[in-house]
Image: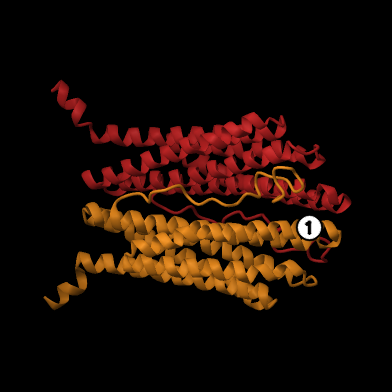
Chain colours: A red, B orange
Amino acid sequence: MKSAEHIVKSYDEELRRLTTIVAQMGGLAESQLSGAIQSVVRRDSDLASSVVQADVKVDALQDEIDDFVVRLLALRQPMAIDLRLIVGALRIASDLERIADYAANVAKRAIALNQAPLVRPVHVVPRMGALVQAMIKDVLDAYVASDVEKAKSVWNRDEEVDEMYNSLFRELLTYMMEDARSIGICTHLLFIAKNIERIGDHATNIAELVHYTVTGQKMGGARPKGDVTSSTLPGQPDGGTA
Amino acid sequence: MKSAEHIVKSYDEELRRLTTIVAQMGGLAESQLSGAIQSVVRRDSDLASSVVQADVKVDALQDEIDDFVVRLLALRQPMAIDLRLIVGALRIASDLERIADYAANVAKRAIALNQAPLVRPVHVVPRMGALVQAMIKDVLDAYVASDVEKAKSVWNRDEEVDEMYNSLFRELLTYMMEDARSIGICTHLLFIAKNIERIGDHATNIAELVHYTVTGQKMGGARPKGDVTSSTLPGQPDGGTA
């Protein structure tokens, strides 16, 4: 009996283990983002390098989850909630991989930023970063606790991230126009801001997946979409938000 | 017997139908990208608007694939190649959704671009677009034909897209520095180029998924990664590529 336990784990145990690996991958993605933001704020290129290098660890966890999911689907015949949980894990892992990838990109750009003089608009990065980090933390809590209300609150917060992105975008354009020498640096900041904004979108995705996993229903209501910078030009009568 | 055929479709038939819906979604994503590029080249904002509006059709197809996959996993007990095929469809659909989303973003930015005077660096967009469109077409062909060699050839082409992106990036920075009034417009072009480059990455992802689905093995070799613009600054001794 004792040895059989070691060989054949219970199905429940396997499902718990799946959730644990996803939560672990989430924690790693969260710490990658935190490191990336810190490497911008403290102008710490060593930290940035270590974030870039650690991205493979996130990919390895995703591979582990993928293999686990395929094995579970093949060996068990999951139905209803279990099936949603298993397929949900696969998708959440894919969003977490994207989040970590964007964080690594922020870190890469931090290395370039740190070679140049400090520019003023950098100050928005930690604020935007803190907001998105809190979203990731909360959506992971919601995932582990199957807390639909918490997932919904994360979903609603994405608009704030988009607003911050829009305002940083305007600030960066103005800054570039005032000082052409800052264009190279500000371009990195533009992409850093866009990366953080995209991370917010993926946290929102995960919130939707938590909702679907728990309830079997898609989250109702239109998705908050606040990046207005892609459809307008600065100084246009209808725009002003660039 | 006749009526039973209508109710219980054969498993093979269902798998073929899954491949067909994915191919259909791929065709739609391809045409969305083509429309987006054309709306930039021909400065056609009506076309751009229709691309933006048609993005919901891609999302609807993804939902259909997701539901179909979950149903197949629940009703059948797919093993080995079938399981890879079914899980692969889910993932390819997710990449296609991202591709279409980036295409819609290009179209959105085209509307903004068309409100401003033409800038020279636009000429690279159709070239980069054509390259990426061919990648999507070929990877979809590889998917439908389970052609691993063709998938591999798509995978190798991503480097060329990255090189084109790097060169456009340099050109745009130079242009912005020469003429501060072009900064707003060039920023849209920067993001358009980045979106197209990301579409190439997703075509590469799909190539990897085709390889895995057919062979059960991950594609060997390091992934071609040629965007050097994120880690360097223009005019830096080690950079020059911005």
Can you say whether A158 is above or below B97 in the image?
above
Give whichever of A57, A17 is nearer the camera: A57
- Pointer 1 chain: B
| Along the viewing direction, whichever of A113 and B39 lies nearer the viewer | A113
Compared to B55, does B187 lie above or below?
above
Q: In this view, does A47 lie to the left or right of A85?
A: right
* Residue A35 coordinates in the image, percent (x, y): 61, 32
Q: Quadrant of residue B60?
A: bottom left
Residue B144 pos. (x, y %): 34, 68
Query: Does residue B30 appear to the left or right of A156 in the view shown?
Result: left
Between B85 and B60, which is closer to the camera in this rendering? B85
- Residue plotted at (73% across, 36% down): A114
In this orientation, which residue lies closer to the viewer: B211 or B12?
B211
- For the point 66% across and 66% down, the residue is B108
- The residue pinned by badge 1 equals B174
> Is residue A137 something one can see in this rendering?
no
Residue B27 in sight: yes
B212, above or below A152, in the image = below
Q: In which quarter of the image is residue A125?
A: top right
Tag 1: residue type? Thr
Residue B197 is situated, as x and y percent measured from the top left of the image, at 58, 59
* Residue drawn at x 27%, y 64% as measured from the top left: B15
In this view, which residue lies farthest toward the left? B1
- x%, y% of residue A235? 84, 62
Would residue B19 appear left or right of A232 to someone viewing this image? Answer: left
- The residue most toward the front is B237
